[in-house]
Amino acid sequence: MTHIKRYRRRNLILASSLAIMIPNLFAAEPKHVAVAPEQMAKQQLSHPSQTGVFSHSTMLPIDFDQAAQNRDSNGATVEQLTQTIYLDNAENSPILFLGPQAESWQISVSNPNGLMLLNEQQDRAAQLPIQTFNIGQQNFTGKQLQLNSTASGEYQITMTRSAAAVQQRASQSQADGFLMFKGDPSYKVYSHFNQSMTLQNKPLQLIAYAIEDGLKTAERQSMLTKQAMTGTITHAQVTITSPSNRQRTILLNDQGLKGDKLAGDGKFSISLPTNEVGTYTSQLQVQGVRPDGIPFSRTVTELYPIEAKSYQLKSTSAQLSLNQGFRAKLSLPVTRTADAESVYLAAELWGTNPSGERKAAAWVGGVVSPTGDQADSRLEIGFDTRWLTRQGLKAPFALKSIRLQTLDTNVPIARLDKLKISSAKNQIEQMYARVTNAKSLEAGVLNQAGITPDMLMGSAPTNLDAAIRAVNNPKLMLVHGYCSGDAWQNNQFTNSVEFQDFNQNRSHEEFAQLILSFGSAYSSYGIVAHSQGGAAALHLYSRYWSGLDYANGGRIIQSVGTPYQGTALAGNLAALGAIFGAGCGTNTDLTYSGASNWLATIPSWARSEVDYYTTSFNTKWWRYDYCHLATDLFLNDPEDGTTEKWSGQLSGAANKGHKKGWCHTGGMRDPAQTTDSSRNASMNSRAAR
């Protein structure tokens, strides 16, 4: 399809005054969009069993509340915490000890043969230096012990600190830090929730099982087909931190109890708390014995947002009414709570062909706001009637697979399988008369294949076209990522401006609104984005009218290292940030499950306007390779230190290739991907403005 933003809508009404101030041009005007029936399967929500987390690593809390009181050689009171860990990785790999008071910890480690590998208390020369670890563009302090030619089995870790050195924790419900290490990547634990509709006081289960993949570098789709290994997991527990920061630990089981579906199938599960609205953190710990007799452990840290059930879709008919031209609207009946906010409405539009067969006309979606009182509210979604007339579809009409999703977390909060559409005979006659009276193919499509941009996203607000023509100041906008500082080499781009919302945690919706506000000073712009900035730019283009719709001359959105399908770091970063009393907090859009829910709202034609790049670290056969030592524990190769190659893929977009030797940010083993002058020059020359 040609660049749909170049299509100029000839029927826009000129603004009464061309002296409109540019900063006020682009208000948050939602687009009501559509997708052709042959593409609408991509707009369905993925099953939650496909959007979980694979783990080959362990991240255990360091909790000195469990320590024993002793005295050191000088008679001073010390706290001593001893822990057994199960390490099944024979490669050279580190053990990390992260915590805000790590400098006060004296660490000793012995291997399965009883050999002391480290004893900081007795050997001053063996003291591990305090280091700063950059994880997901956030810094955490700690120590690192490098293990070489590791023996698999049980390791004994003892951590000692002076009782006098104890300081106040960031939160009393949190531990003092985390002990982290990597297991054999060919054995993984997979963890997922049982549904995406995570509502307050509604049942929700966590499911976990072990798989053997046999490959060091695994393909996610291949791993998802693996059967659970029975008789492998010996213990599984999950610690839940609620939105109000309360913690509880519960055991998973494979006995068909407390939310477990089938006893003895190797899948351990448990019902999770859902009583509070907000984001929960779940920290799963699994221990077991592999088929070859080697003990192992794995952990998964995940986020799950709980939303209030603020809407209920009614089963009475939706109402169809015609607007100007080819536009129409569907009004759906709902009940709502007093504080119900705008939501994303998505549904499939169906009609009946001349042979009496039910046929899909289009998928429709958009941001909608409620009208009417709570008990008798309505949500209205606009669409183009040519989706019906192009296939000769007539009544009875219906909506199928209807759902409402929150704007910030994309959680589905209401669903309905089918809803009849009430329409009068004269309305149907008018629809077909308007097509018959159309003067050109662009204005009215009479054949089976023709689709205009107006059919995909409607027409821009009526004053916008004239106002854009009145001021000519196109730009290339450089956008950073999640919780990020300055990311781009500004001097490598021309006629550009830099979006600045540094070191902040934003949902895709909030991020997109900020880009929209910043971009309102320009008549049009293309975007070059890093990391989450790419998802926010696509979110903006898919949901709201903006300067992106008026950009010309090249690629509208270009991104580098964007985790379109999420990242395993999202949950781990939240847990680490809570320990340190810092960090950027929780962001469910960046989890695998949250990203999947979000992608179901992004039309295929919008994705086609994205050109994206992925990178990963250089590999050398003689060494342990990674972008970052800490993030390598959580990610599957190849990855850039934040985004795995597979999760950086965007179906329907233009994949511009994968390049080795570049990592996500500075401070990693290879240079930051945004500093690649060759790629930057290419994006600059090909960018729309």
Image (spheres, grey):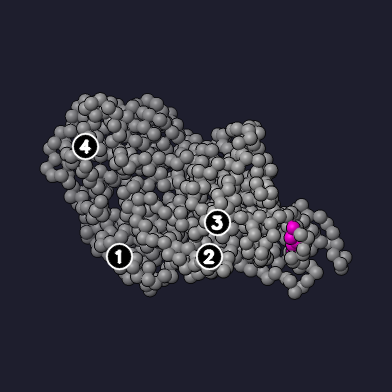
Q: Say which of marks 4 and 2 sits in front.
A: 2
Q: Which amino acid lies under the numbered mark 2 shown in the image of this protein?
A: Cys
Q: Which dot, 4 or 3, sits closer to the camera? A: 3
With respect to residue 248, does 179 lie above or below? below
| Image coords of residue 245 (percent x, y) | 63, 47
Q: Secondary structure at mark 3?
A: loop
**Is 31 left, or right, of 133 in this rendering?**
left
Q: Which residue is mark 4?
A: 390
Residue 292: percent from left, percent from top: 66, 49
Image marks 4 and 1: residues in contact by CB distance under 8 Å: no
- Mark 1 secondary-structure assignment: helix
| Residue drawn 23% across the image and 26% down it | 355
Helix, strand or loop for disc 2:
loop
What residue is disc 3 on?
216
Q: CA distance from mark 1 to mark 3?
A: 37 Å
Indicate which disc, 4 or 3, sits on the residue closer to the N terminus: 3
Q: Is residue 406 left or right of residue 89?
A: left
Segment tinted magenta in the rendering: 106-112
Q: Nearer the viewer, residue 262 or 589?
A: 262
Horizontal side, residue 11 vs residue 105: left or right: left
Residue 627, numbered circle:
2
In the picture, measured across the screen, residue 4 lies left or right of residue 295, that is: left
Evaluate if marks 3 and 2 touch, with contact meaning CB atoms under 8 Å apart: no
**Is residue 672 among the parts visible in the rendering?**
no
Circle nearer the viewer, 1 or 3: 3
